[in-house]
Structure formats: structure tokens, C-alpha cells
Amino acid sequence: MRRPETHRAIGITAGLASATVLGVVLASHDPHDGMSLPLLIAIIGVIPSIVYASIAHAAARRYRRLLAGEGVIARWTVSPQLWKDFNVALGRQAPERPDGVDVLIGESSTVVDGDVRYFPVRGDQKVISVRYYDLAVPYLVFEIETTIRHVPSVGNHVVPVALGAGADAVCVVENYTALIAAITEGSRGKR
């Protein structure tokens, strides 16, 4: 989630606006008239706003913790040229960043250019491997398995690695590999 604090504020504002509308509609609503359209819209608006604000709040907390150095495994700044080359290699458009792009890798989250991603190592969505590719445009690949209704699917999250940050990238791979192995061994022991 990009700029989680902004998303949290939007969710809270939308929730408060929906709750206000709901209060106004309820105050003027005659219970004998049944369900009116404004009442239905107000009710429908409150619930998604609360869910959205809760998700954004969790992302904002992870983001603040990583920025404070809590649970950070590695941190580097990708140069503007490497950022451009990275996005060209992935076939996507990205805004130019004259100061480069900050990357933080935590124990269960990444932040790339302000975009927070949460990667648990257990549950319905989990990291199953992390690989480092030391190429002209170096990068990490987080392989993520998502299980929906007992059907697993695998996707990747690709993170650029700054030139000269290869040792940090290897540390990330080793950290996640050990964590995944410990959880896998622990789950085998419970069976």
C-alpha cells in the first residue's frame, strides 16, 4: 500500500462522513417507512470505510516501525538510473526519482519507494522462498503462496537491490530461509 498514512486518513474520513450521514438519516427516518435508499447507502458506506481504515492503519504501523528501524533486516537506496533500469526490465512505467528509491526489508514487510508490502511466513498468504539475482540490475524475488479455499497459487514480489548492497541482499535471503525452515520444521513436529 503506497502512503499508508494517507490511506488511513481517507478511510477514517470516509467512515466518519458515512457515520454522520447515517446519524442524520436515522434521526429523520420514520421506522414505519421501512428501509429507505439513503439509509441503505449510509449503512453500506460505513462498513467498507472501517475495514479500509483498519487495513491502512495496520500498514501505517508496519511502515512507521520499519522507518524507526524495528525489525529491519536490510536497508539501501537504489540509484535513479538503477530504478529506471529495474522498471524497464519489469516492463512497467514508474515515475523518475531524482534522489533514488529507499528500500527497507523487514522480518515480514518490505517498503519500496514508499509502497508497503506485508509478507507473513505462515497463514493463507506466506513467503515460501526468497532468491537474490546478482545481475546488471540486481534484485530479490519473494515467492509468495496464497491459498484461497484450499487452492494454492504462487506469485512473486520483485525488489530492486542497490549496487553494492549484495551482502545485505544475501543476508535477507539467509534470514527468510532460516525463518521459513524453522516454521516448516515446527509445523512438521505438530503433526
Image (spheres, rainbow, N blue to C red):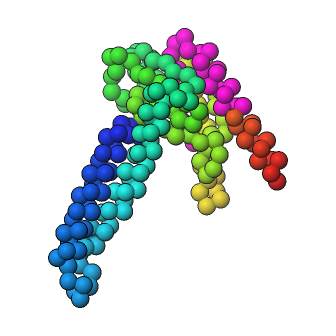
- Is residue 22 depicted above or below 190 in this figure? below
Q: Which residues are magenta?
A: 155-178
Which residue is at a point 42% across and 15% down the rendered structure image? 79
Residue 91 can be seen in this image: no
User: Which quarter shows the N terminus?
Assistant: top left
> Furthest-top residue in view?
164
Q: Is residue 76 magenta?
A: no
- Is residue 189 depicted above or below 2 in this figure? below
Q: Quadrant of residue 44?
A: bottom left
- Is residue 175 depicted above or below 135 in this figure? below
In the rendered structure, the answer to whether residue 167 lies left or right of residue 61 reads: right
Nearer to me, 41 or 28: 28
In the rendered structure, the answer to whether residue 126 lies left or right of residue 185 reads: left
Residue 184 can be seen in this image: yes
Q: Quadrant of residue 61?
A: top left
Number of dots carrying numbers: 0
- Is residue 158 depicted above or below 77 in this figure? below
Give the image location of residue 132, x and y in percent: 62, 24
Which residue is at a point 66% across and 28% down the rendered structure image? 175
Which residue is at a point 29% across and 47% down the rendered structure image? 10
In the rendered structure, the answer to whether residue 84 lies left or right of residue 131 reads: left
Which residue is at a point 41% across and 39% down the rendered structure image? 60
Q: Is residue 169 magenta?
A: yes
Give the image location of residue 170, x and y in percent: 64, 20
> Furthest-bottom residue in view?
32
Give the image location of residue 74, x and y in percent: 55, 22
Give the image location of residue 116, x and y in percent: 45, 36
In the rendered structure, the answer to whether residue 14 lies left or right of residue 76 reads: left
